[in-house]
Image: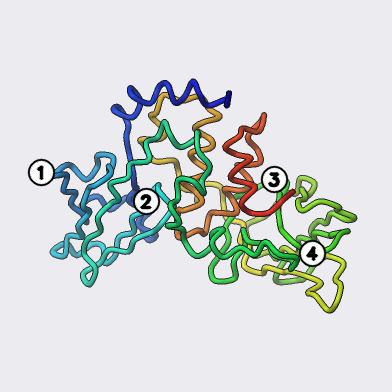
Amino acid sequence: MRAWTGLLALCPVLCQAATFAAFIQPDPATSKIPYEAVTIARKDSAVDSRQPIQACDRIRFVTTQTQYGVVYVTTLRGGKNFKLDASHPFVDISCVEPGIGDLPGRSWKDISGGDRATYSIAAMSRGDQLSVPILTSEQSNLVAAPKRSIFIEWSGGTPPYRVVLRNSNTGAIITSVDNVTEHAARTPPVDLAPGQYSLSVFNTPADGAVAEIRENNLFVVPSDQLPPPPRALADAKLDETDKALLYVYYLEGFGDGRWAFEAMQRATAIMPPSSGSKDWLAQYGGD
C-alpha cells in the first residue's frame, strides 16, 4: 500500500475546501499578482479573480486596464503556461480536474496527459547519449541562494562521471565531484553568492561521443525571489511532505520552467523520500 493512501482519503473534504487547477503568476516588474487584469467565468457566473482557479474556468484578460500588458497563467495539470494579452485575451482551463489531494498519489507523467512545457521529459533522450534534461539553454535556470549543496541528475554517457560548478564570469571552479559511477551527484555545501554560474557533467566518451554537457545559464538569485507557494497550497491541510511535493510541481511549471532546477533541489530534499518525489526525480535521469 502506497504511503499517500491516507491523503487520498482526505480528498473529498480537502478538494472541496481548496480545489485549484491553475495560478495567476506574479507580475515580474512589481511582484504583485495582477488580479485586476483578469476576470474568471465559472459556468454562467463571474467569480472573484482572487479565488482559486478551478477546472473548466475561463480566464479572460481585461483589455481596458492599462497597468498590465500581459498576464501569465500556469496550469497545475502539465505545468503549462499561458500568455494572456490583448491579442490572446482568454484561456479555458482543462475540465480534467487534478485536485490537490490527488497529486501526490500519481506520478507527474501520469497526470500531465502529455501537455508538457518544452523543458520537460517530452524532449528527454533516454538513449546512450549524455543528456542533462533538467537544464536548458533556452532560458535562465534559477536556483535560490545562499549556502546549499547542488544536486544534479542526467542520463546516458559512460562512467566515471565528473560534475563541476564554475563561476561563469571568471571560469573559476567553485566545487566538483569526481569519479561518479551513477547518473546523479551532489556537491558539498557551498555558499553561493547571487550571480551566473555554469554546471558541467563530464563522462568518459566512446566512439566520438560528447565529453561534456555544460550549461552556462545557471543563475543563483536571492532567496526572497523564490516564488511563494500559492495561497490555496499554503492553506491546505496537508502534512509537510505532501505540501513540499506539491510545491515541487508548482515550481517546475512556474515561469515557463525557469525554476525547474530549484524544484529538483527541493524534491531531493524531501526526507524520507516519498514515492511521489522518487517518480518526479526519475523523469530527469538518475538510476
Q: Earlier in the sequence, mark 2 or mark 1?
A: 1
Q: Earlier in the sequence, mark 3 or mark 2?
A: 2
Alpha-carbon span between mark 3 and mark 1? 48 Å
**Residue highlighted by disc 3:** 147
- Residue at image position (77%, 50%) is 185
Residue at disc 2, secondary structure: strand
Alpha-carbon span between mark 3 and mark 2? 31 Å
Q: Are marks 3 and 1 in contact (CB under 8 Å)?
A: no
Q: Earlier in the sequence, mark 3 or mark 1?
A: 1
Q: Earlier in the sequence, mark 4 or mark 3?
A: 3
**Callout 1 amino acid:** Ser
Residue at disc 3, secondary structure: strand
- Residue at image position (65%, 38%) is 269
**Callout 4 amino acid:** Gly
- Residue at image position (46%, 58%) is 116
**Residue highlighted by disc 1:** 45
Alpha-carbon span between mark 2 and mark 1? 21 Å
On screen, residue 81 above or below 94: below
**Residue highlighted by disc 4:** 157
| Residue 78, numbered circle | none
